[in-house]
Image (spheres, rainbow, N blue to C red):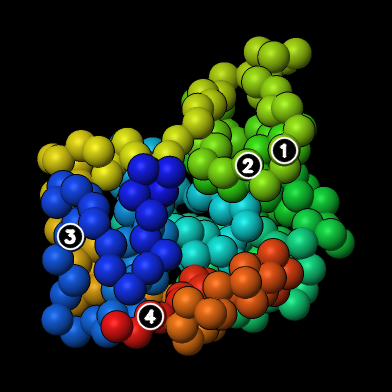
């Protein structure tokens, strides 16, 4: 936890169980951009079996580092990733990252587009970083027996239980990376899965911008809050 172990420093002290080996082919910057996004997406989509070959998965905030990792993990599993974005500005980048379809939520009817893409069936899984009242709309895109996995809270409003009015057969849950990082066996499996993807080129660390030196922390946070990035923001340090 960042509250217990601060890492905005030239040197950091963390529990050994929280560290993993960086593959030799990755630079330090690439390594910094790999584990949080890929382990987060791995645990929700691959480890828990919520995604299978041929399944459709809907990814919100898809241009985030976790969203991009989820696209690539879905592809590796053999699933069909559907990315959402609020504007068209990031559409081509999402397609280049491997999204099979991109839905611009600021211009398109999300449930209608999902029905068109899936032939009316809906998706098996929604992997959502937003939460809030919008989960009701997301639930309307899920096939019977499917899953809503909420892993972020970009919308700070209350998050309702989807289907409470219609009793839709959809399971929903909140999820965090700590379900993997605090379990030695799950972390070992996740490390093996991600390392294999890095080795064969299926997985690529997505680095949007690098800021040099701890003096740039404020600038880096302002850039992050601007919401224009596609991938991870990395701050380098010097001894």
Task: Give the secondary structure at mark 2.
Answer: loop
In the image, taking residue 27 as reference, residue 89 lies left or right, namely right
Q: Where is residue 205 in the image (x, y as percent from the top left)?
A: 38, 75
Q: How crowded is mark 4: few (under 14 residues within 10 Å), some or many (20 or more)?
A: some
Tags 1 and 2 in contact by the CB under 8 Å rule? Answer: yes
Q: Residues within 10 Å of mark 1 (few under 14, many from 20)?
A: few
Name the residue located 73 percent from the left edge and 27 percent from the top edge. 158
User: Which of the two labelled residues, at mark 3 and mark 1, occupies the earlier sequence position?
Assistant: 3
Q: Give the numbered dot on residue 20.
A: 3
Pick whichever of labels 4 and 1 is earlier in the sequence. 1
Measured in 3D between alpha carbons, the distance from the residue under mark 3 to the one under mark 4, in whole angstroms, is: 20 Å
Q: Mark 2 points at which residue?
A: 153
Q: Is residue 220 left or right of residue 213?
A: right
3D distance between C-alphas at marks 1 and 2:
6 Å
Cα distance between the residues tagged 4 and 1? 32 Å
Q: Mark 4 points at which residue?
A: 237
The residue lying toward the viewer, choosing from 74 and 37, is 37
* Disc 3 crowd, CA 10 A, few/some/many (<14, 14-19, 20+): few
Provide residue 39's location: percent of width, then percent of height.
33, 53
The secondary structure type at the circle numbered 4 is: loop
Disc nearer the start of the sequence (3/4): 3
């Amino acid at each position: 936890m960042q509250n217990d172990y601060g890492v905005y420093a030239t040197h950091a002290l963390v529990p050994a169980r929280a560290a993993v080996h960086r593959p030799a082919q990755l630079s330090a910057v690439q390594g910094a951009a790999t584990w949080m996004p890929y382990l987060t997406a791995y645990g929700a989509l691959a480890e828990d079996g919520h995604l299978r070959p041929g399944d459709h998965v809907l990814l919100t905030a898809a241009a985030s580092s976790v969203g991009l990792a989820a696209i690539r993990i879905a592809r590796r599993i053999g699933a069909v990733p559907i990315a959402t974005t609020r504007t068209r500005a990031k559409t081509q980048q999402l397609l280049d990252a491997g999204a099979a379809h991109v839905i611009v939520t600021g211009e398109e009817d999300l449930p209608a587009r999902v029905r068109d893409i899936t032939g009316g069936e809906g998706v098996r899984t929604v992997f959502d970083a937003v939460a809030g009242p919008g989960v009701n709309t997301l639930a309307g895109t899920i096939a019977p027996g499917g899953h809503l996995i909420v892993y972020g809270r970009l919308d700070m409003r209350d998050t309702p239980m989807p289907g409470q009015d219609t009793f839709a057969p959809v399971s929903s849950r909140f999820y965090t990376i700590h379900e993997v990082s605090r379990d030695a066996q799950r972390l070992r499996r996740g490390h093996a899965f991600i390392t294999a993807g890095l080795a064969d080129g299926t997985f690529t660390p997505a680095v949007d911008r690098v800021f040099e030196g701890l003096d740039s922390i404020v600038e880096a946070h302002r850039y992050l809050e601007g919401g224009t990035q596609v991938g991870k923001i990395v701050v380098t340090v010097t001894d």
